[in-house]
Image (cartoon, grey):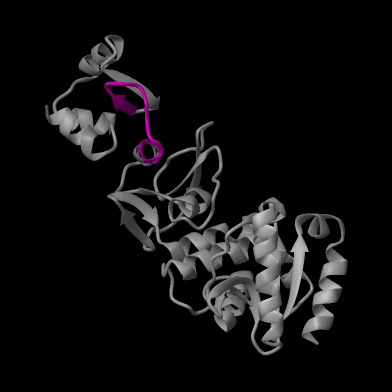
Amino acid sequence: MALAQVAARQDGVISTAQLHALGVTRGAIEHRVANGRLHRVHRGVYVVGVPRLTSRGRHRAAVLACGGPAAAAISHATAAVVWGLRDRGPVRIDVATFGTGRSTMAIRVHHTLTLDDLTRQDRLPITTPARTLIDVTPSLDDDELLRACNEALFQGRIDPHPIGPPRLREALSRLTKTGPYRTKSELEDQLLALIDRHGLPRPLVNAPLHGSTVDFFWPAQKVIVETDGRNHLRPLVYEADRERDAHLQELGYRVYRVTSRQLDERPDHVARRLARWLA
């Protein structure tokens, strides 16, 4: 029962050290493995009962395999996914440790001298969002880094002041000018990346305007850009878009609609036209 209680607090996993602390001997562990009550996940780490793990259980098992919560924590790209700063993570789980753990096919170990920038999310030891951004900066391109920083600011996970290496400080400085934003599609992300590559002023994103929400808005120039995916080709949506465009134009705004094909095939043309409109 004590074994089950420990595993329940750890998303179904337990370490050899914890089993020994409960009085379970090496022979008893081998017996439980043989009869299917324990299932090996990593060296010295087992899942109790059914051999299935949630993503949180996999993270917990990786920490236990690298020395446990006192010596290891989820970090780098894996931590970025846990914090919601990135959509997809690596196949191997990133763990920072000042112990003696080694990388395996399932775990990528990052040795560190200290884990001062450590916190817990639902009892899972993990590097803080600020430390996570510092750790992942070298592995992200400029667009990916900007999106990760924006998400951290949007969720209120970091303070709005530059930290870390120069590239990270630059990305955070750019976002403090317009504030964090939340995009709704990959097409919007693509257009934002184009704006940044061409050094154009950053717009407000998904901004409320006269009873509706516009994708991108430059208030000073009264310029609006709408990104049109396939959904905007539906007859009812198409008609509603044109009705709204006409209303905004009557109020003195310029509306530029950009399609995914334009961004894929003629991105420089889109950037030049937008630059003229903003000049």
Q: Does 52 lie within the magenta span?
A: yes
Residue 264 located left or right of residue 224: right
The residue that appears at 13% across and 26% down in the rendered structure is: 23
Q: Quadrant of the N terminus?
A: top left
The residue that appears at 19% across and 20% down in the rendered structure is: 25
Q: Relative to the observer, which residue lies in front, 261 or 3?
A: 261
> Residue 270 falls in which quadrant of the image?
bottom right
Magenta residues span 45-59
Residue 83 located left or right of residue 223: left
> Residue 171 falls in which quadrant of the image?
bottom right
Residue 249 located left or right of residue 108: right
Q: Relative to the observer, which residue lies in front, 252 or 26?
A: 252
Q: Quadrant of the C terminus?
A: bottom right
| Residue ranking furthest to the bottom | 220
Residue 191 visible, this angle = yes
> Residue 35 falls in which quadrant of the image?
top left
Q: Eyeballing the image, is 27 above or below 272?
A: above
Q: Position of residue 104 (x, y in %)?
A: 51, 33
Q: How many marks?
A: 0
Q: Relative to the observer, which residue lies in front, 184 or 148?
A: 184
Q: Eyeballing the image, is 279 above or below 140?
A: below
Q: Position of residue 267 (x, y in %)?
A: 83, 63
